[in-house]
Image (tube, helix red, strand yellow):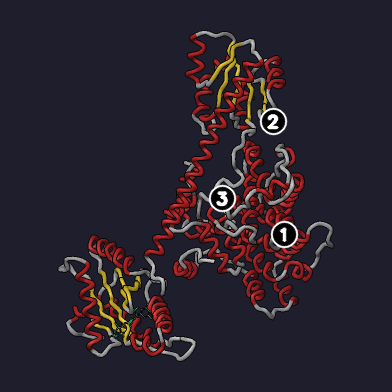
Amino acid sequence: MRQPIDMKRFEQLKAAGDLPSPRGVAIAIIRLTQSPNVSAAELARAIRGDPAFVGRLVKAANSSLGAGKRAVVSVKDALMVLGLPSVRTMALGFSLLSNYRKGACGAFDYEHFWSFSLVMALSMQALALRVRVFAADEAFSVGLLARVGELALATLYPAEFGGVLREIAATPDLHQLELEEKAFAMTHCELGAAMLLDWGLPEVMVAPVQCYETPEQAGFAEASREAGVLQCLVLSRAIARLCLSPESEHANLMPPMLRLANRLGISHGDFIALCENVGREWGEWGKLLLLETRQAPAFSRLSSTKEAPVAEAARRPPDGAGQGPDAGDELRDDEAVRVLVIGANEDERACMRSTLDPDTFLITEEDDYDQGIERAIDIQPQLMVVDWGHAGCWADWIRALRDTRFGCSLYLLVLLDHLDEETLRKATEAGADDFLVRPVCPSALALRMQAGRRTILLQLRLEHEREELRHFAAELAISNRRLQEVAMTDVLTGVPNRRYAIDRLYMEWAACARHRRPLTVMVADLDGFKEINDAHGHDVGDMALRQVSEVLRGELRAQDVLCRMGGDEFLVICPDADLNAALACAERLRAAAANLEIETGGPQLRLSVSIGLAVRDESMPAMKALIKLADRGAFLAKARGRNCVVAPQLAGRAP
Ligand SMILES: Nc1nc2c(ncn2[C@@H]2O[C@H](COP(=O)(O)OP(=O)(O)OP(=O)(O)O)[C@@H](O)[C@H]2O)c(=O)[nH]1
């Protein structure tokens, strides 16, 4: 698996101590479980030091057993059931949960985050038992930690991440990952995956975590374990979203979930039972973890969608490999439309019930206009039939409704007592889309309602296509970024290449000139490198180049950049470093290279480096002059016998 983010940056974040990390007894447990010789007794002793963890561990062991197994009551038994890797990640997950319940990012709802993660954990565990492509015990922790990157961004950059969240709240069409990419040059998925890898979670679980929010980019082989984990993560996220969303959104969220479950080969009935169990466990775990949970949704009532035969699942491409951005969200022509009828009389309602197919029109009725308004906010109908006799006085309210997010796409059919210019004008002004004149004729009603439904489906389809376009654009942006990274990186050593060096130097030159800050560059050229190639072969030469560049990079400050210009020549850009500071740094580089014992698998080799350096001064017309001067320094260093540092601006002074 490719590293999710630049490891140097990740190490810096880690070293700064700001990344969420386990505390207390969890550290002892994690350390012990990393040792292959740890005894169960030793580990049980450490675990008993945290009574809260004991309860959670035993409960997790019981949950991962599946039905009909003897209950686990002791820590030792729980250890046997779960195994060391799971205990380690559970200690980690629960420790984070206890220690990161609050934080500095005001816009980040920590309580909601953990409650959501808990549903994901329970759903992953339940799905793992059902689909059996990975272990249920590991699944719990993976679900619990799948969103840890968001917690990390909230912890590392509370103000900036808060800004991203506020932007999304104000404009829900924006994509969080894109905003994060712009703000932090990494996404929470990438950061989370890097953290999970660092904590030792297996790659087969981490790779899907990195892309389950954009499964269309995963590219896992069909029927691979990664593809299985990915599908379960996508579905667990959907279950968690449904559990934590307002009731009015439940009906919309359920059908895609059923389709995802169907693709995993889980029958309608089994899936509903699974969700209900997750809902129950959510409440129990919430009490154990002192986490706020909600009344679990009534899954069976929501599941009005007809069960698709499992055989159909086998014909569909599995998620991951060929899965589109809308995984499980495709629109169908038999999609049901939510209808709210306000104020029609009993005959008209009876006419609707007998004329309209209840599978395509989900009708809710309200007599009273006040109640109707509340109901509209609650169920967010897509089509509303209103009695204009009442609605006439509510024209302002209808206008206001049109300004809301759901109201602007609402299809509004008004029932008129009689047809006259003035009434029609007012209804049109208030935002009506169509009308029916009383007495209502059933065929006219059916025709108008079908027309409304077609418009709604068309709108949904357009929205769906827009969503697809956004996904493709995001995918393209990511591919472009990856391509750019490749184009700017030296393949052999992994450090930035000449192209990057020139671009970066332009930027630093301009910034330092603008702010009147020093800028130093070094040209570092290996000594006698050709002899290594000639004596030991090109492969050994390559090893030497890699090891030297790694050592040099390790000696630099965070803001300095080492680039390979080609062959055995490197350029170091040191912004904000004057000649004296850069001389000290160059001397460190020289000594580090000279002390390096190059491992070749055969003889250990040594080599040295000659370094020339130059600092930008006002008389230099352009950056080329700076490089030229540093180059001259390297030439003089060679002439002085190599393995030394020369700064021509110091008129011959060598350190
Ligand atoms: N193994 C390996 N060798 C390379 C690579 N690129 C360039 N070289 C070799 O690097 C050597 C550079 O030779 P020179 O410029 O004479 O450098 P040197 O032997 O260090 O001599 P001085 O700089 O005078 O100390 C040549 O033999 C190139 O073929 C590479 O990617 N891998």
Residue type for callout 2: Asp
In the displayed structure image, the side of residue 649 where residue 377 appears, left or right: right
Instruction: Name the N-terminal-most of marks 3 and 1.
Output: 3
Residue most toward the front? 315
Q: Secondary structure at mark 3?
A: loop
Residue 117 seen in the figure: no
Can you tell me whether the CB of the residue at mark 1 lies under 8 Å from the nearest atom of ligand 1?
A: no
Residue denoted by label 3 = 109
Q: Quadrant for residue 149, please give it.
A: bottom right
Residue 132's tag is 1
How far apart, in angstroms, are the residues tagged by discs 3 and 1? 33 Å
How far apart, in angstroms, are the residues tagged by discs 2 and 1? 34 Å
Residue drawn at (53%, 39%) of the image: 464
In the displayed structure image, the side of residue 121 where residue 585 appears, left or right: left
Residue 600 image position (x, y, % from top left) = 46, 86
Closer to the camera: disc 3 or disc 2? Answer: 2
Residue 567 image position (x, y, % from top left) = 33, 77
Residue type for callout 3: Asp
